[in-house]
């Protein structure tokens, strides 16, 4: 039988491990250099476990340790306790969570052909990117492809905005338009002034929805590759929708048409 977890204890602000954690929390692209991410709080940690992710490390504030549920206490082979004051200096939250996981971030994977996908074309707002990941996961899109210029998918802000969606998606970033040629599914996009109305359009499945930059929209090079352009009905007369809102509408329409 395996005995109870015996955690390491770190109380020094100068500890190299603490410095590495702070980089993950405070620097948007540190996850690429370290090949790992920091996810904080009960919700994100449980979301990772539910999707089969095994944490490299579990980090707990000392005051929380005795109250830690067994599934979280035993989640990682390397368990670390830090003082509450030290946890507050690492945390990226205004009200620090008492626990976090360090998870391996996969090396740059390859695009999966034939998979229902979402393509992010230079979407720069981390909140928008995280929200789109949540919609993709909710509506059965298994792959998200981020073109160069898109907010870093593993950055702390996108991880928090994604609310655990990352753990159920195949993520590839740093791509160019030419890389999409291997997708082998129709590319769809929206326009404010042309194309069939979304709710009247025949939508293919699987497909890949292209979502464009907040100010410039979908790049002309990508529009030229698009098999189908649709409009979202806006009877209220607004000029355009926030890209995350448009994504939710389009992805839901595809899921509904597919019978998901």
Image: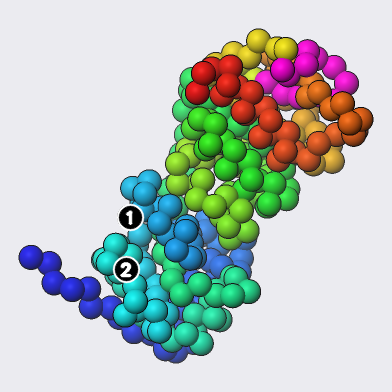
Q: Where the N terminus falls, by quadrant?
A: bottom left
Q: Residue 189 in the image: state x and y as whole percent.
A: 72, 23
For residue 209, which quarter of the picture? top right
| Magenta span contains residue 19 | no
- Which residue is at a point 23% across and 78% down the rendered structure image? 6
Q: Is residue 5 left or right of residue 203?
A: left
Determine crowd level at label 1: few under 14, some 14-19, many 20+ residues with C-alpha closer than 10 A: some
Q: Which mark is residue 116?
A: none
Residue 9 to residue 68: above or below: below
Residue range (magenta)? 188-199
Where's residue 173, x and y in %?
58, 41
Looking at the image, residue 185 lies above or below residue 156: above
Report whether residue 177 is seen: no
Q: Judge whether residue 197 is colored magenta.
A: yes
Colour approach in the figure:
rainbow
Q: Viewer-proximal residue, 187 or 249? A: 249
Indicate the secondary structure of the residue bearing disc 2.
Answer: loop
Number of callouts in the render?
2
| Dot 1: element | loop
82 left or right, relative to 136: left
Within the image, what quadrant is residue 149 found in?
top right
In the picture as drawn, the residue positioned furthest to the left comes out as: 1
Query: Which residue position holds label 1?
Result: 54
Determine which residue is flagged by label 2.
Answer: 69
Front label number (1 vs 2): 2
Q: Could you tell which of marks 1 and 2 lies nearer the N-terminus?
A: 1
Residue at 28% across, 78% down: 7
Image coords of residue 120 (percent x, y): 66, 37
Q: Residues within 10 Å of mark 2 (few under 14, many from 20)?
A: few
């Amino acid at each position: 039988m395996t005995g109870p977890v015996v955690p390491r204890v770190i109380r020094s602000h100068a500890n190299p491990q603490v410095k590495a954690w702070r980089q993950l929390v405070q620097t948007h692209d540190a996850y690429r250099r370290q090949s790992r991410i920091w996810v904080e709080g009960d919700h994100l940690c449980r979301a990772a476990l539910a999707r089969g992710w095994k944490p490299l490390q579990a980090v707990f504030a000392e005051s929380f340790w005795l109250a830690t549920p067994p599934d979280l206490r035993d989640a990682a082979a390397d368990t670390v306790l830090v003082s509450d004051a030290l946890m507050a200096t690492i945390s990226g939250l205004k009200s620090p969570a008492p626990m976090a996981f360090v998870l391996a971030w996969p090396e740059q994977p390859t695009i999966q052909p034939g998979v229902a996908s979402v393509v992010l074309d230079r979407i720069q707002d981390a909140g928008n990117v995280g929200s789109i990941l949540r919609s993709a996961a909710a509506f059965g899109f298994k792959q998200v492809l981020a073109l160069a210029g898109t907010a870093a998918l593993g950055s702390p802000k996108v991880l928090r905005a994604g609310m655990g969606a990352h753990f159920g998606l195949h993520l590839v970033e740093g791509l160019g338009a030419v890389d999409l040629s291997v997708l082998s599914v129709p590319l769809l996009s929206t326009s404010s002034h042309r194309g069939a109305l979304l709710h009247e359009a025949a939508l293919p499945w699987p497909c890949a929805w292209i979502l464009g930059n907040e100010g410039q929209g979908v790049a002309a090079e990508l529009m030229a590759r698009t098999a189908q352009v649709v409009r979202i009905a806006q009877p209220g007369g607004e000029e355009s929708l926030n890209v995350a809102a448009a994504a939710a509408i389009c992805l839901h329409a595809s899921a509904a048409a597919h019978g998901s």
